[in-house]
Amino acid sequence: MIVMKFGGTSVGDARAIDRVASIVQGRLTQRPVVVVSAMSKVTDTLLTMARAAGAGERKAALKLCRSLQERHYNTASELLGTALFTQFHAELGADFEALDELLRGISAVGELTPRTTDHVAAFGEVLSSKIVAAAFSARGLNGSHVDSRDILVTDSNYMQAVPQYDETNERLKTNVQPLLDESQVPVMGGFMGASRAGITTTIGRGGSDFSAAIVGAGLGAERIEIWTDVDGILTTDPRICPDARRIKVIGFDEAAELAYFGAKVLHPATVLPAIQKNIPVYVLNSLNPSCEGTRITTHAPQGQNIFKAIAAKKHITIIQVAAPRMLLAHGFLRAIFEAFDRHKVAVDVVSTSEVSVSLTVDSNHSIPALAADLSKLADVKYEGRKAIVCLVGENLREKPGIAALVFRELADKKIRMISQGASEINLTFVIEEDEVPDVIQRLHKTFFAELDPEVFA
Ligand code: ASP
Ligand code: MG
């Protein structure tokens, strides 16, 4: 069997869902389980209305809910036609009644808890999976809606719940496998699950890829297909380099580094359940289904090029912590990281000298509060408008002299921090944010002028 996961834009309207149906039709002999995201932007809207309700703005919340209802009804009636929609619309209606009730409850209490947030957020995938399953059936595809809250068992860490694999795999085998055996096409919502007590949970924003990987690992899929609206993973951002090319095959580790450093293709956590079972993951384009996309696999051929891709992550702040005290003072780094921990700020790149530490963080964090805390330990300076540039490739491990090649191209640039990752497959450094296009273009020209056809399209 295979898992086919369709993201929000791939199920964003009736036309998109129609395309999904024909893509799935073409894969029927491979026995697909379909995992869908909420329709595009729906999760954001749900969270906005939940917050509005939490702030006591009942009318605003319900108004947003009506527009959401209209969009889902229109999509469903367009897909199903009047006769079928008449039967189906009661089912959607019940969901919207439940959502309304929830919003009224939240606004009456005037408090939005993580648990209630998950209740609201899950509606996006509940609705999209029902509509897609009904659309499949209307097209003779034997779609069978499966409520993911009956399958994906998680802990109770709301909004960031952790899957409980043993129980989830059990339920996949007892509830989903039989549908495949009867040649049905199970359609599940991603992102959501339920605790052992049956309370709705979600596994973190963008979590539908993760859901797909969990389902694929649990059912022993031959492969997992992540359908998006780009042709796969590219050598770099095509908005910066119009000649960016598709990577045909890439290692899991390489893809994880890229996802982390700004390539918006795949959630790194997706990688985990699939790697453990050695299941290849494909990134494919629902707007261009005949394109072969990118295969992500444990053992990828390396080819002749040094790098697979270049990514940049903008909106970075460098924090410099300097203290002569660090000289021989063990425990200093721990104290610094404890401060980051207290402020729940994640660090991307670290470089240290005998007397100072530089760290990069996402500029969205509230840095002044963190800096104030750190300044109890040492002198602190911070500077925004930076970007991390990351070159990724397994070949980096083998070949000497690569850093020299990279920095020779950037001899006139101010390079702030350099780190060759512990994984040995990335070369990372920090530059001024406004230099990103120039730096990426130069490096792309240097390292991707000639491409090994085994690895690149
Ligand atoms: N709909 C959820 C989100 O937007 C999950 C997903 O799309 O993967 O975060
Ligand atoms: Mg989404």
Image (cartoon, rainbow, N blue to C red):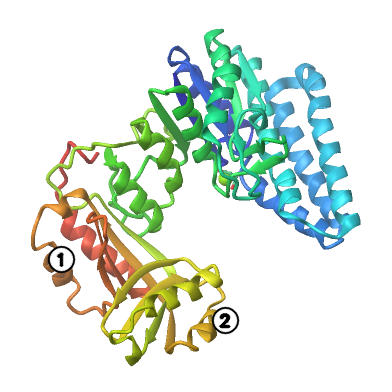
Q: Position of residue 456 (x, y in %)?
A: 23, 41
Q: Residue at x 52, y 30 (%)?
A: 166
- Return the residue found at the far right: 108
Seen in the picture, residue 333 relative to 71 is either above or below; the reply is: below
Which quarter of the rendered image does ligand 1 occupy? top right
Residue 403: image tag: 1
Place residue 442 in its image quadrant.
bottom left
Place residue 78 in its image quadrant.
top right
- Provide the secondary structure element on which disc 2 rests: helix
Q: Along the line of sight, which residue is nearer the eye, 425 or 326? A: 326
Quote the CA–CA distance across marks 2 and 1.
36 Å
Q: Residue at x 55, y 36 (%)?
A: 164
Q: Along the line of sight, which residue is nearer the eye, 298 or 335? A: 335
- Provide the secondary structure element on which disc 1 rests: helix
The answer to whether mark 2 is within 8 Å of ligand 1 is no
- Give yes or no for contact between labels 2 and 1 (Cβ–Cβ under 8 Å): no
Q: Residue at x 17, y 38 (%)?
A: 453
Kind of residue at disc 1: Ala
Seen in the picture, residue 243 relative to 23 is either above or below; the reply is: below
Q: Position of residue 403 (x, y in %)?
A: 15, 66
In-image side of 70 versus 241 (left or right): right
Task: Estimate how packed mark 2 is, as few (under 14), some (14 to 19) or many (20 or more) residues with alpha carbons within 10 Å.
Answer: few
Residue 369: image tag: 2
Q: Residue at x 45, y 46 (%)?
A: 269
Confirm whether residue 263 shows in the render: yes
Q: Earlier in the sequence, mark 2 or mark 1?
A: 2
Confirm whether residue 234 shows in the render: no
